[in-house]
């Protein structure tokens, strides 16, 4: 799509912010695994937490094309940073904005938008990843309360989360219609989070388990209606996937930028290696695939902004962009030769960060299933 002047201005302002405030910290965030609170607050101050969230709930309501621009530009410099803005904009923010009561919005969504509270979305379990509906976590009614038991795993931001949207089975006999979402606050007896995971990439975004041991929550903590949780999760993932696709685009673009810089500088056989056709074939292949992903992503984002259903398109964008960014990052590293394997060059970090994208928010194989289900229904 051709961006409007306003969208071009937004891209420029995000790029300036990324270069000035984020890029100087990216290597340190990756190495230490610590995400500076000061940077988190700057993201909130720039309204990056509420791009997809309507104005009346504390967001800017700028929509998905703008969200993808922000993700792409920030992912070019620091993928960990983008993980801190995906949750308020999609996995956490959307269920609260779309299903939350006025009280829930006031207590959770507004402080999340302002960077005062951080929440997260807990769907995955040790035995229920791709098969989300097979979750074991249960919520059993006890008068006006529910008693939650179970364990969620690989939960982004869980170690620092103030509250969590937990999906639990309230009626096993109803299958996917027997799953309910609950808002559970840290500090509730029986709620805890596991050890911070040691990961291959996106190290500045903490991940851990969420443990629920006879956690008693009032029925007013249900998000949406009883039995609506699975549909809520699926619809949320549709929107989340387009945003992850834009993150992949930013990762691929940064790999490309590094590759072009390197092949112009690196001399072998008496000339810069970019002069060799074998290298040019690789670069052309990378550039073409990046631009295919870009077209698909912004087309899907525009459709979403127009209110169209994007279940298939978002799955295609996430599938194609995540596979593409792994391919491009691997080729960019290859172009760096031995230097690409050393931590001194940014491509090493870019390559590690790319790896998770074909896995989280639904593996590539799950995206293929979603695409096929839409085709065959
Ligand atoms: N929008 C609207 N409705 C949807 C939907 C969507 N995107 N996806 C599923 N549904 C509906 C289906 O139409 C079906 O409705 P009916 O009962 O009326 O027929 C219901 O939800 C159940 O769907 P389905 O039968 O497809 O459920 P499955 O258990 O077969 O699972 C997949 C479907 C595999 C797509 C789902 O489990 C999934 O997305 N898994 C991956 C989870 C994931 O991405 N995890 C990442 C971690 S979370 S960050």
Image (cartoon, rainbow, N blue to C red):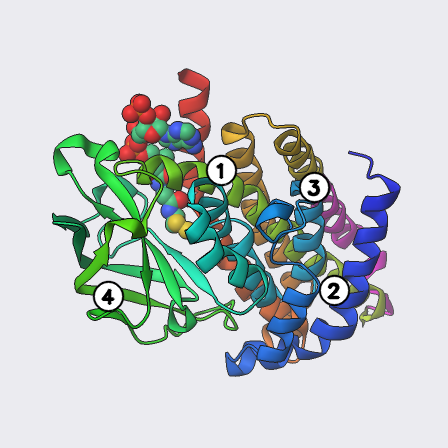
Q: Name the residue under label 2.
A: 258
The relative height of residue 301 versus residue 213 in the rendered view (above or below) is above
Tell whether circle 1 marks a residue whose Cβ is less than 8 angstroms from ligand 1. yes
Asked if residue 4 lies left or right of residue 18, the reply is right
Q: Name the residue under label 4.
A: 211
Magenta part of the protein: which range?
A: 268-291
How many angstroms separate mark 2 from mark 3 (CA)?
Answer: 26 Å
Q: Residue drawn at (42%, 45%), measured in percent from left and top?
A: 101
How many angstroms separate mark 1 from mark 3 (CA)?
Answer: 15 Å
Q: Residue drawn at (33%, 69%), measured in percent from left and top?
A: 186
Give the mark nearest the N terminus, 1 or 3.
3
Q: Quadrant of residue 84?
A: bottom right
Query: In this orientation, does residue 75 appear?
Result: yes
Q: Quadrant of ligand 1?
A: top left
Asked if residue 268 lies left or right of residue 188, the reply is right
Give the mark nearest the N terminus, 4 or 2.
4
């Amino acid at each position: 799509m051709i961006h409007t002047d306003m969208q071009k201005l937004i891209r420029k302002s995000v790029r300036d912010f990324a270069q000035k405030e984020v890029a100087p910290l990216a290597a340190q965030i990756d190495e230490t695994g610590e995400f500076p609170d000061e940077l988190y607050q700057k993201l909130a101050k720039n309204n990056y937490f509420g791009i997809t969230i309507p104005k009346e709930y504390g967001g800017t309501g700028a929509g998905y094309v703008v969200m993808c621009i922000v993700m792409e530009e920030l992912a070019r410099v620091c993928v960990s940073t983008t993980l801190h803005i995906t949750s308020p904009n999609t996995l956490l923010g959307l269920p609260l904005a779309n299903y939350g009561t006025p009280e829930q919005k006031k207590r959770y969504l507004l402080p999340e938008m302002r960077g005062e509270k951080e929440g997260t979305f807990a769907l995955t379990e040790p035995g229920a990843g791709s098969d989300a509906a097979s979750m074991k976590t249960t919520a059993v009614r006890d008068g006006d309360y529910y008693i939650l038991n179970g364990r969620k795993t690989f939960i982004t931001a869980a170690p620092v989360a103030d509250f969590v949207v937990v999906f639990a089975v309230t009626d096993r006999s109803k299958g996917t219609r027997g799953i309910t979402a609950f808002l559970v606050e840290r500090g509730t007896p029986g709620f805890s989070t596991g050890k911070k995971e040691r990961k291959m990439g996106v190290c500045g975004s903490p991940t851990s388990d969420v443990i629920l041991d006879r956690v008693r929550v009032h029925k007013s903590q249900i998000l949406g209606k009883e039995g609506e949780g699975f549909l809520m999760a699926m619809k949320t993932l549709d929107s989340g996937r387009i945003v992850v696709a834009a993150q992949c685009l930013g990762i691929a673009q940064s790999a490309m930028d590094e590759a072009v810089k390197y092949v112009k500088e690196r001399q072998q056989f008496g000339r810069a290696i970019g002069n060799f056709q074998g290298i040019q074939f690789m670069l052309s292949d990378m550039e073409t695939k990046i631009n295919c992903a870009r077209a698909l992503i912004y087309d899907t984002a525009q459709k979403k902004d127009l209110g169209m259903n994007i279940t298939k398109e978002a799955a295609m964008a996430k599938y194609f962009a995540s596979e593409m960014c792994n391919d491009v990052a691997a080729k960019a590293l290859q172009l760096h030769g031995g230097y690409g394997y050393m931590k001194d060059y940014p491509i090493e970090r870019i390559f590690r960060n790319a790896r998770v994208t074909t896995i989280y928010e639904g593996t590539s194989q799950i995206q293929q299933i979603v695409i096929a289900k839409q085709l065959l229904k």
